[in-house]
Image (tube, helix red, strand yellow):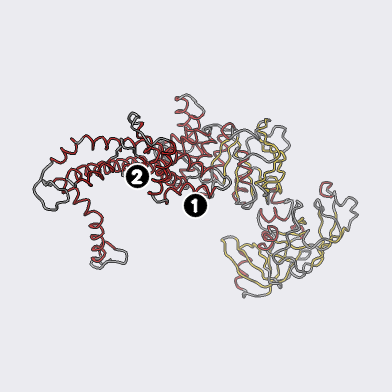
Amino acid sequence: MTSDAPILSIRGVSKRFGDVTVLQDISLDIEPGEIFSLLGPSGCGKSTLLRLVAGFETPTSGSIWLDGKDMSRLPPNRRPVNMVFQSYAVFPHMSVEDNVGYGLVADRRPRAEIDQRTAEALEQVQLDAFANRKPGELSGGQRQRVALARALVKRPRLLLLDEPLSALDAKLRDAMRLELVKLQESVGITFVIVTHDQSEAMAMSDRIAILEGGHLRQVGSPAELYRKPSDAFVADFIGNVHAFEVQRIDVDVDGAGAGAGAGAGAEMVLDIASARLGTVRLTMDLPKGIEPGEQAPDSTLLVVRPEHVSVTLDEPPQGSVSLIGQLGDIAFQGSRSIVEVQLADGSGLTAIVDESIADRLQAADAGAPITAFWEADAMRLLGRQAHDTASAGTGTGTGTGTGTGTGTGTGTGTVES
Amino acid sequence: MATDKAGLFDYSRKWSLRLVFVFGAIFLYLPIIVLIVFSFNDSRRGGNVIWKGFTTKYYEKAFGNEELLLAFGNSLTIAVTSTFASVLLGTLAAVFLWRFRFPFKPAFEGFIALPIVIPEICMGVSLAMFFSQMGWMDTSNRIWPFNLGNIIIAHITFSFPFAAMVIRTRLASFNPEMAEAARDLGANEWQAFRDVLVPHMRPGLIAAALLSFTLSLDDFVVTFFTSGPSTVTFPVKIYSMVRFSVTPEINAASTVLILMTLVLTYLALRYQRLAS
């Protein structure tokens, strides 16, 4: 977002339908030539945001700028932006060729140009042999290509894709994912993709915006979102996390500017008190908005990703954070296995381990005592929510004093409630 | 699978069900078949069920009957005109109800459907009262086809709700993303309507037109109340002929009408199949 000429600039956009606020003060810039994903659970407002960009809705407040021009009030047919709809919306009564040429006919281009560009677009999506077919004779994947060609033939500044892979079967989805990225590279058009599937977004996007409850949670590259999530929701949505409630933060090292610590890069040692983890010593920056001292039981979480958790039947290594539980199910997944550890309070913890550990665990009885452990550095201290929409989130099993450790499932549920 | 035992859903292979089917078919079509067969009967009375030999003279007679031909021409004119008007109005009403949200919409939808359930006799009387209040009842000084205006208006009032409902039902299956896609690709509101919505509605439009046409062509009650002394339609004419005496000429005229309806329906269905 540092480049001085974003192709699309969404500035303070809010959208209300009657009393329902669907989007709240969204601002983001999209750079030319990138694949940008709008990611979030259903009902987060991502599709509405896409429809605002396409022109099917107008913002209640704020504005949308394309190439430095305000297009918030332009009707969809006058925006240099095209969309691939979730249902593809291929016109069933027109041939493939007529579908693809439709936008050019509407623009009153000369016949020769229409024919030539249509043929090119069909070639681009490898449908040149199907030009005279009706959409009813095509498979789902082929229909999607028609929708793609139909949008690309107009050479839009932005191509909007609404859940482009959700209607395809699993095998085709993986192939199409790669193909979309290749197509974007070859045409050089900026793609904006709406999706609820984090792995899809991670695999395809240059940058991702995470939306939840109409708020923009975080914008960043997939790696940034994974490594430096801004809050527990993002951390849990981009890959899973185990979350532990933090009751008290003590700053060991002199933390003069504790609140501004995140930007300043000051190191501080925190004592994290939690009923089960006990005191954990961490060296890290205090995230923005988290102050040393007593914490409300649901405001600050210490999270660790399952892939950073290991298990052992013996003593955990010195210096690691550990929890004792019982061995639960082991799900074999080839080179890796997912191990479930049953904790004393009934919650579960999953660890992702490699073959050698899994083999040893297979030999042990179910319910055998086992220790889950991880490096203290693997943990992150996060606010439950970066926005002030929180406080409603004391649901599912995390609120009690004993149940401080929460599995992945409960962690998500709490944030969403 | 065994071939001699009919499965639970093999209706066509159970003799009891076949019997029901045959009786049903006889019940429905025997009167029509009798009507057609006896249009060729060489007898002076159409109601006479004694076969007296084959003849086509009653067809010649029917086609030579100028009053009957005039009534037939009137009926066709009324049917064609009111069909166009009904389909147009029905389309507008259906699209309006489908596209917009407005206060009292359910009440409005109910009002549109009302003429379908109101007894025809009530509609006939109310329309007759309306026309006489307006001073339109005497049509004898108007030239053809304007003397049919009353009947055309009356036919539109009862057939347009049918058209609206048929088209509305068809619109329910329209994916709004289609219209949005057209808009997104550069079409304005009108172009999106013409290029995407109308093609989707087409089967509904054809069905609505067929329905309106048949409703108008064979309407007796409403027409009887709203036609002036100088305007006679085919069903009204037949009625007056039957009161006088039933001759094979009526059978012949009715057979021609049945044939026309069949051909029209066949063409409409064929066109619909070609379009999809």
Q: Nearer the viewer, residue A357 or B252?
A: B252
Name the amino acid, label 1: Asp
Where is A38 relative to A232, above or below?
above
Instruction: Name the quadrant containing residue B76.
Output: top left
Horizontally, is B90 left or right of B24 in the view?
A: right
Density class for disc 2 (Cα within 10 Å; few <14, some 14-19, many ≥20) is some
Q: Nearer the viewer, residue A407 or B228?
A: B228
Residue at the disc numbered 2: B215
Left or right: A72, with B201 as reference point: right
* Residue A137 seen in the current view: no
Q: Nearer the viewer, residue A66 or B53?
A: B53
Chain holding disc 2: B
Amino acid residing under circle 2: Leu
| 1 and 2 marks on the same chain | no
A89 lies left or right of A36: left
The percent position of residue B109, horizontal first and vertical second, equals: 50, 48
B68 w.r.t. A23: above or below: above
Viewed as shown, does residue B215 lie left or right of A26?
left
Residue at point 84%, 50% (across, down): A261
Residue tagged 1? A169
